[in-house]
Image: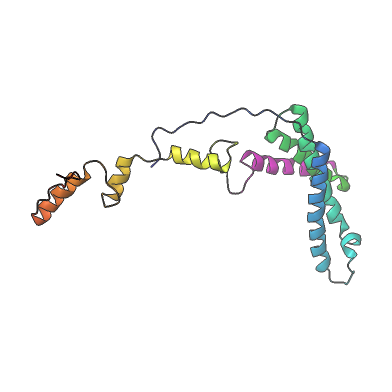
Amino acid sequence: MANPHPIQRPVEEKLFHQRDALKAGAQGALVGGGAGLVLSAVQNSLAKQNVGAWGVFTRTGGTIASLATLTTVYSFSKVAAGNLREKDDAFNTTIGSFLGGAALALKSGSTPRILGYGAGFAVIMTAFDYSGGSLRGTRTEVPGMDEYERKEHLRLNRRRPIEETIADLGESRGIKPPGYEERRRERLKEKYGVEIKPVSALAE
């Protein structure tokens, strides 16, 4: 049972720090290029005809270019939008994902497809970012907590009163609340008819 009087932690307002958009774009290119290379290799290995190892670049190399373009534009645009707005929120993800999806569909030359790819990718990524950016859900009760602070928050917020714990577990040798010895003597007297007198620790 949760503590009826939870401890509320004040949320500290974080200052925005500028980030390097070019560095973010380069990192996005590496991630997207690596993922595209793996996917291209899988496509090449599933080909019916033998195209050789270079088929990863010559036959299915478009996969590498597409994913690299998507992640580069997305990463660069997201960070650049945050720097211009001086905010770090889900709207930056919306901007970056729309431009990334639109860049992915540029080779089609179709305006509806470009807008559709951008809008679809923006909706998916914005919803993912707004909901916490994790498939397992948000792990912290207050944004910005590290793991130690999260556990301390849970411990303080969900600590149960000792009376409630004793009522659930019952009294035993390891759990001795105030008045335990008196109640123990009464129980022994009722059950066995033996009256036990307390022993003084002071020598007479």
Q: Quadrant of residue 49?
A: bottom right
Q: Residue at x 58, y 40 (%)?
A: 146
From the image, which quarter does the C terminus lie in?
A: top left
Q: Is 161 drawn above or below residue 53 in the view shown? A: above
Extreme-front residue of the structure: 204
Q: Can residue 128 be seen in the rendering of this structure?
A: yes
Q: Can residue 114 be seen in the rendering of this structure?
A: no
Q: Is 136 drawn above or below residue 37 in the view shown? A: above
Q: Which residues are magenta?
A: 111-136
- The chosen color scheme is rainbow
Q: Is residue 113 magenta?
A: yes
Specify whether 133 is left or right of 77: left
Residue 52 location (% of width, % of height): 90, 69
Residue 111 location (% of width, % of height): 84, 41
Specify whether 163 is left or right of 91: left
Q: Residue at x 10, y 56 (%)?
A: 192
Q: Residue at x 56, y 29 (%)?
A: 11
From the image, which quarter does the N terminus lie in?
A: top left
Residue 72 location (% of width, % of height): 82, 44
Q: Main secondary structure of the magenta part?
A: helix
Extreme-left residue of the structure: 193
Q: Quadrant of residue 75?
A: top right
* Front-lying residue, 64 or 87: 87
- The mark tally for this picture is 0
Q: Is residue 125 magenta?
A: yes
* Front-lying residue, 26 or 192: 192
